[in-house]
Image (tube, grey):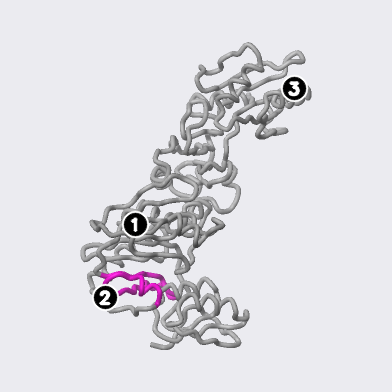
Amino acid sequence: MLLQKDEVLDRLATVGNVAQFVALRPSSGALEQSYSRIAGYSPNSRFETIDEALAKLIARSGEGKLNVRSYRPHDPRSREFVYGLENIDDVLGHANRLAAEGLHLIVNETIDIHDGGVSGVLQGDTVEFAPDDTPRCVEKPGVASLPFTQAMEILSTVYGFTPDLRPAAGERTEFSVHPLKRGWQQAHTLLWEHEKDVPNATTAAQRWPNHFSRFLGDKTFGLLMAQTLGMAVPRTMVINRRIAPFVFGTPTGSAEVWTRTCPTEPHPGLYTTVKGWTDPFALLANEDPEGNMIASVLRQDAVPAAHSGAAIVDADGNLVIEGRSGEGDRLMLGIDRPEILPASVTEGVQLIYGMLRDTLGPVKFEWVHDGKRVWVVQLHRGATSSSATTIVPGEPRIWTDFKIEDGLDRLRVLLDQLPPDAGVSVIGEVGLTSHIADVLRRAGMPARLPAR
């Protein structure tokens, strides 16, 4: 026999933490309590009146608000849903009105989906989630989709606790994770639905940008992915706009640091990266006063750089490794040219690429070699359409020259001014892995290099 929603919720509460609730059923023209879970009270505690039960519920709600959900018995579809009521009289008014229509009710605490946590679904060994949404986010584009072990490592690093979730073949769990404790067990993980005998999800996509990578910042998410895949990542403190600072990565042995802005999506060379410490709050106020573009500021251990550079996959599927001795910031900006690298360095970068490719497919990453091993300092997915003489393929009506020495800011101005049928002819020698090449690829406008 199909269980009613309050019965399902009562059973779910025996296996995990649920949002605090009082379930009500119409009986002889009045409301009667069926099940309940309220923090500090035993399961299904009975209260003298419905008013008392609701008063206890709202008093223990983290937001001080309640929702009223209505449904017909043994009908899986919900009916009217009233959200975020702050007054007990309003809750009772809606409850009595809906009960008069023969509907059953679940009154539960309002959980703020914008509290810095995430919601999603665990199905089989795949976890999909997003911030600022309910578990229904999995029905929309843009969710993070990761294997269970990788998802738990990333979420526990970001939030400082491991979500209370367990994978099981043929099972599906809707959940949410919160920085502050919630629910009748006062824990960080809430369960919303749990089903058995469902198909296992397909392989996790492991793609970004997604909503969670934008929430943390693209560099942060890429580095977390690299760390979970076994790469050496410099110790990094993340100062995010919406959640408490957190740290991940491995100490490099250097007392020097880099301060890096971390935009929601890649904007090569647009925002500040500086060696040494600078005020992150002044940086955010100066470069992104509206708070829309930069998600975080990173304090990252410097790597004692014997060689630095980047690696991409070109239009023919070949790995292109570019670098030079010392630090690589001037190389990435197109100021310095790539050099011939020692075989031990290129072999180390090739090894790292192979390990990343086996899981993620073609990737681009920035690296630093300290003389002993390769450190990953940025990671992105995907191949490029570039070749030795072409950054972006195409046959425009007109070509416009751009001199490397004019710099990234002038290039961005030029791209904004060019008509749609134009292309850029780059004058000077610059690496295919440089920020200049990245900016041109992101613009999607035909761009060519002089023959070498």
Between 386 and 160, the one lying in front of the other is 160
Per the image, label 1 sits on a secondary structure element best described as strand
Question: Looking at the rendered structure, which numbered label has been put on residue 323?
Answer: none
**Residue 243 vs residue 29: left or right?**
left
| Disc 2/disc 1 C-alpha distance (Å) | 25 Å
Look at mark 3 in the image and give the residue it sits on.
96
| Label 1 CA crowd tier, 10 Å (few <14, some 14–19, many 20+) | many
Q: Callout 2, which amino acid?
A: Leu
Residue found 49% across the figure and 73% down from its top: 439
x, y percent for residue 440: 50, 75
State which tag comes first along the sequence, 2 or 1. Answer: 1
Per the image, label 2 sits on a secondary structure element best described as loop
Look at mark 2 in the image and give the residue it sits on.
341
x, y percent for residue 126: 47, 45
Within the image, what quadrant is residue 104 found in? top right
Residue found 66% across the figure and 30% down from its top: 86
Name the quadrant of the N terminus: top right
Look at mark 1 in the image and give the residue it sits on.
300
